[in-house]
Image (spheres, rainbow, N blue to C red):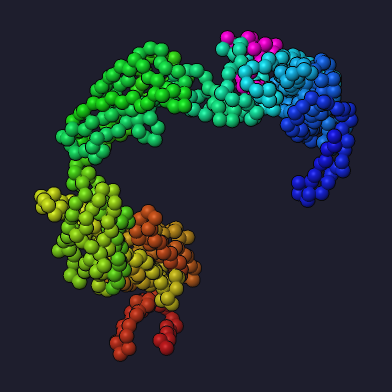
């Protein structure tokens, strides 16, 4: 025998033909296959190891020279262990088990077969386990498997062993399909009777078992099953459950109107492998109240375990408006033992609605349209009642201001046939004139009316607003955010500013704040007439001229200056807008009033000059 290792990425040979030592001959026949290598973790390093099978039995049916198993490093081909089974030829690869869950395989279980005599083809099987955690593997146990019914070739051990904890003692049992029977052996002693009475004798199968077994919960009863070819071996137990895919509870009619009679039907089956050993009570509850109870004396398993079918029972109730919880419970009195009981309950909802109800879904955000433009608005109409019918959509735009328009898009259908839960969308076109202000808003009432009964209608209100723009400007004489002013000691100093509402809606100031000037005192805003302004109310695009005023103490030195920052805010929350103005004031013996004027050409202007004149000298000014 030889073994090769091929690199999976490149296809190149990592090993050229490595000979397996200790091979010999065997004259028994037939031979079905040579088991391939089994990859295992036999030590603490990261690299895996392999176990090779030398299948021959050199001395035939005589004990002591059975098939050989060799543990080998995959990196160096160094041998880790080498032992023979007590007897028999190996057509099946061995099974490695990690019994203590430490990540290292410590047990190797195998199955072999041999002829009982050289004069006939009567064959026997042998199964056993070796402890391979020791330097020299130690046989823990081995057992014979006697021939059964069938042909000679049925008794060839082709199916590999599998492990499964059948008795819950944490040591897995070994399960082997041999001949036309399924065998199980206790993981500790190897004795079948040590598992349970049910496993003390092998389980008969309908035909030879050469296929490898698989383990899974095939029938959904919460326990593992064994699948061998086309044969499923399951736990013998009852398993009642409602029918799957929402068929456990059904309603007739499926859509019911308030006051109408509805039939509730519960359906369940026995998905297990055994008929119930006692009567079973099944109940239907509506909103937690029992409305029907029925007893079933015999519920046979359904195929493939039996010939049973679905069990049904029904109750009639009068439907009431609302959403009702309907529940089917099986074995309400816990009369029987089942493979699982977590599937004994199923719930469903009985939804009872009026036959003719329509929901009108307007956009979640208010429609805001810029002045002088239009917008398309999509509105969905959905029948949420139980009936399909024809409806008519109308609208009332009488509350819109002059110049505003609202009409349906030419491609939309305003006489839809509405099916339950299928939205129908209608597009509307809304426009507002360029003269509309940002604080204007209005609404349109949308109504849908049942064609067959005009008394059934539903209305919703669609708000429409002008898209509001906000802006604020504060500038000085040079158009920037700063201004200069003067004042005589003992009088008020003033600086000119202009405040403008840049938005398209009326605005009121929410705050007017100042920073403290070095001269002391509190600045204020005043009109040209000297009236103090505590808050501002500005129409769209309105401008107002104001004066920042501060009293100059009589002891203030001429030529000295102070500064303050003015902050005006409009709006609130996330829509707050604030603007700042830097104001510089200087103490002077001469003041010209007004300090700044905005005018058109050919307009006569007047100024007044206030000064503290000295005892001698003269005053000059330049108005160029």
User: Residue at point 23% right, 62% down?
Assistant: 413
- Quarter of the figure with residue 47: top right
Determine if residue 542 is in view: no
> In the image shown, does 187 or 453 lie closer to the viewer?
187
Check residue 385 for magenta coloring. Answer: no
Please state the horizontal and vertical placement of residue 157, each as a whole percent of the image.
70, 24
- Work out which residue is located at the far bottom of the displayed protein and give it: 602
User: Looking at the picture, does residue 381 appear above or below residue 149?
Assistant: below
Residue 119 sits in which quadrant? top right
Residue 85 lies left or right of residue 388; in this view the side is: right
Between 171 and 538, the residue placed more toward the observer is 171
In this picture, is 516 found above or below 247? below
**Quarter of the figure that contains the C terminus:** bottom left
Q: Residue at x 26, y 48 (%)?
A: 420
Residue 472 point in image, percent of width and height: 37, 67
Image quarter in which the N terminus is found: top right
Across and down, in percent, residue 595 comes to: 37, 76
Determine the image quadrant of residue 445: bottom left
Q: Is residue 212 left or right of residue 316?
A: right
**What's drawn in magenta, residue-wise?**
177-197
Q: Is residue 174 visible?
A: yes
Query: x, y (%) of residue 456?
Result: 13, 49
């Amino acid at each position: 025998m030889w073994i090769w290792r091929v690199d999976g990425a490149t296809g190149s040979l990592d090993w050229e033909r490595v000979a397996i030592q200790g091979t010999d001959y065997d004259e028994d026949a037939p031979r079905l296959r040579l088991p391939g290598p089994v990859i295992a973790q036999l030590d603490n390093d990261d690299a895996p190891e392999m176990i090779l099978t030398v299948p021959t039995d050199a001395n035939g049916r005589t004990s002591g020279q059975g098939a050989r198993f060799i543990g080998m490093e995959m990196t160096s081909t160094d041998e880790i262990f080498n032992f023979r089974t007590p007897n028999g030829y190996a057509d099946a690869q061995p099974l490695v088990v990690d019994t203590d869950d430490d990540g290292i395989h410590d047990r190797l279980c195998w199955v072999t077969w041999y002829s009982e005599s050289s004069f006939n083809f009567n064959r026997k099987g042998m199964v056993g386990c070796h402890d391979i955690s020791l330097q020299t593997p130690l046989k823990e146990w081995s057992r014979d498997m006697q021939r059964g019914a069938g042909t000679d070739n049925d008794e060839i051990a082709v199916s590999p062993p599998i492990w499964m904890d059948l008795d819950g003692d944490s040591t897995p049992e070994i399960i082997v399909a041999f001949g036309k029977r399924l065998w199980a052996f206790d993981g500790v002693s190897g004795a079948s009777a040590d598992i349970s009475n049910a496993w003390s004798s092998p389980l008969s199968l309908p035909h030879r078992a050469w296929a490898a077994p698989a383990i899974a919960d095939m029938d959904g009863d919460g326990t593992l099953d064994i699948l061998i070819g086309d044969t499923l071996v399951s736990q013998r137990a009852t398993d009642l459950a409602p029918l799957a895919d929402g068929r456990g509870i059904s309603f007739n009619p499926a859509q019911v109107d308030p006051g109408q009679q509805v039939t509730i039907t519960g359906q369940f089956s026995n998905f297990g492998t055994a008929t119930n050993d006692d009567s079973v009570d099944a109940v239907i509850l509506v909103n937690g109240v029992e409305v029907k109870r029925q007893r079933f004396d015999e519920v046979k398993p359904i195929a493939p375990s039996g010939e049973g079918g679905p069990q049904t029972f029904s109750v009639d109730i009068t439907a009431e408006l609302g959403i009702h919880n309907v529940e089917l419970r099986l074995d309400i009195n816990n009369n029987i033992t089942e493979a699982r009981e977590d599937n004994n309950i199923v719930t469903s909802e009985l939804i009872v609605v009026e036959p003719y109800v329509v929901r009108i879904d307007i956009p979640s955000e208010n429609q805001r349209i810029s002045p002088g433009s239009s917008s398309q608005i999509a509105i969905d109409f959905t029948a949420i009642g139980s009936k399909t019918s024809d409806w008519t959509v109308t609208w009332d735009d009488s509350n819109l201001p002059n110049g505003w328009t609202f009409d349906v898009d030419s491609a939309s259908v305003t006489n839809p046939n509405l099916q339950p839960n299928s939205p129908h969308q209608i597009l509307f076109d809304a426009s507002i004139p360029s003269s509309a202000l940002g604080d204007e808003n209005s609404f349109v009432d949308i109504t849908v009316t049942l064609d067959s009964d005009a008394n059934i209608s539903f209305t919703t209100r669609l708000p429409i607003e002008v898209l509001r723009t906000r802006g604020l400007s504060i500038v000085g004489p040079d158009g920037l955010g700063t201004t200069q002013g003067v004042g005589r000691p003992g009088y008020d100093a003033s600086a000119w500013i202009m405040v403008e509402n840049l938005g398209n809606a009326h605005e009121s100031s929410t705050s007017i704040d100042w920073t403290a000037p070095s001269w002391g005192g509190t600045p204020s805003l005043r009109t040209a007439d000297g009236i103090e302004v505590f808050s501002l109310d500005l129409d769209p695009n309105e401008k107002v001229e104001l004066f920042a005023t501060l009293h100059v103490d009589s002891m203030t030195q001429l030529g000295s200056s102070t500064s303050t920052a003015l902050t005006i805010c409009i709006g609130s929350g996330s829509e707050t807008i604030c603007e700042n103005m830097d104001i510089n004031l200087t103490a002077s013996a001469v003041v010209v009033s007004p300090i700044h004027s905005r005018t058109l050409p050919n307009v006569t202007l007047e100024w007044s000059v206030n000064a503290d004149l000295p005892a001698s000298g003269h005053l000059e000014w330049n108005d160029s």
